[in-house]
Amino acid sequence: MGGVKSKKIVSITSVYTFLIIVGIISIYPAIWVIMSSLRVGGSLFSESLIPRQVTFVHYKELFAKYDFGLWYLNSLKISVISTIFMTMLILLTGYIFSTFRFSGRKTLMSTLLVLGLFPSFMSMIAVYILLNMMNLLDTHLAVIIVYVAGSPVFFLFAKSYFDTIPKGLVEAARIDGANHLGVFFRIVAPLSTPMIVYMALLSFTGTFTDFIFARLVLSSTETKTLAVGLYDMITTNFSNDFTVFAAGCVLIAIPVTILFIIMQRFLVDGLTAGGEKG
């Protein structure tokens, strides 16, 4: 008995030691960026992690020297609008494949799954040419359209969740005279709150922090997002505002962090809920 207990203690200790190490490695870059944003001067290099003198002047410089407030509003506008339409499109696509049986259903599902395996940047040149032909370059509408149009490839998670909802509830609603949209919004959606929150969080985070496509399409100061604006801030000639850049990174993380803290319970439920059925 003593040997079994000792092995259990060693096992638990090893697991917690590993988790502590992973936690330190994961959180250290975030702490380093926060401390850098409070450091005097423009250099990120320092002999110590904690600055000897703390200053908040870099946060003021973000709004005084750059159009950081405008970039923030642009990112929020694009992210909120894209999240609403992306979430709805993913949910409706998953509901259709979960509920309806039609010709070519499996072929269409397989096609969407295969398309989802390819990195999105592989189609960037074609998308750029199409947007240029439609005179949509350097507009927020172009970014929103592309984000929303690519969202149905993530339908499988929603379909897996909808498969776990008892079909008797849907059939009973249909017998009572509800149409398909009524069934979806009155029966299915209220029962899918964890999954909806999970998909919305992923959509918002992905669009709020996206750089590659936003950098390709947006160029003027009035349309730039946070990622594009901060990148241009430190890549311009003779720029050395690296501590100001760190302050911008801290402010970018605030809305995402708040959302994850508030929706943590729904996030965990959404991650595990779709695993009962495929």
Image (cartoon, helix red, strand yellow):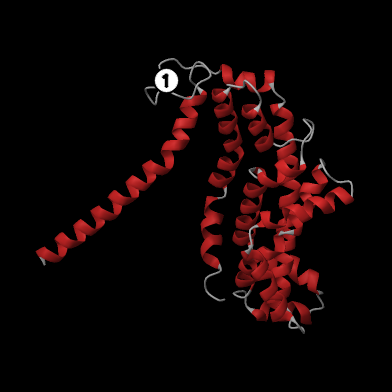
Q: Nearer the viewer, residue 230 or 79?
A: 230
Give the quarter of the image for residue 96: bottom right
Give the quarter of the image for residue 102: bottom right
- Residue 217 seen in this snapshot: yes
The structure residue drawn at horizontal position 74% and vertical position 69%, both measured from the top left corner, is: 184
Image position, residue 198 (x, y; %): 60, 56
> Which class describes the residues within 10 Å of circle 1: few (<14), some (14-19), or many (20+)?
some
Image position, residue 192 (x, y; %): 64, 64
Q: Is residue 183 left or right of residue 249?
A: right
The structure residue drawn at horizontal position 64% and vertical position 67%, both measured from the top left corner, is: 158
Q: Residue furthest right?
A: 134
- Name the residue carrying label 1: 51
Q: How many marks?
A: 1
Image position, residue 161 (x, y; %): 60, 70
Q: Looking at the figure, which quarter contains the N terminus?
A: bottom left
Q: Is residue 270 left or right of residue 190?
A: left
Q: Is residue 5 left or right of residue 212?
A: left
Q: Secondary structure at mark 1?
A: loop
Height in image: 63 above or below 178? above
Image position, residue 160 (x, y; %): 60, 72
Height in image: 224 above or below 166? above
Q: Residue furthest left?
A: 2
The structure residue drawn at horizontal position 64% and vertical position 62%, both measured from the top left corner, is: 118
Height in image: 87 above or below 234? below
The structure residue drawn at horizontal position 38% and vertical position 45%, both measured from the top left corner, is: 23
Give the quarter of the image for residue 94: bottom right
Kindly identify the amino acid type of the residue bearing the numbered disc 1: Pro
Q: Looking at the figure, which quarter contains the C terminus?
A: bottom right
- Residue 85 seen in this snapshot: no
Height in image: 137 above or below 179? above
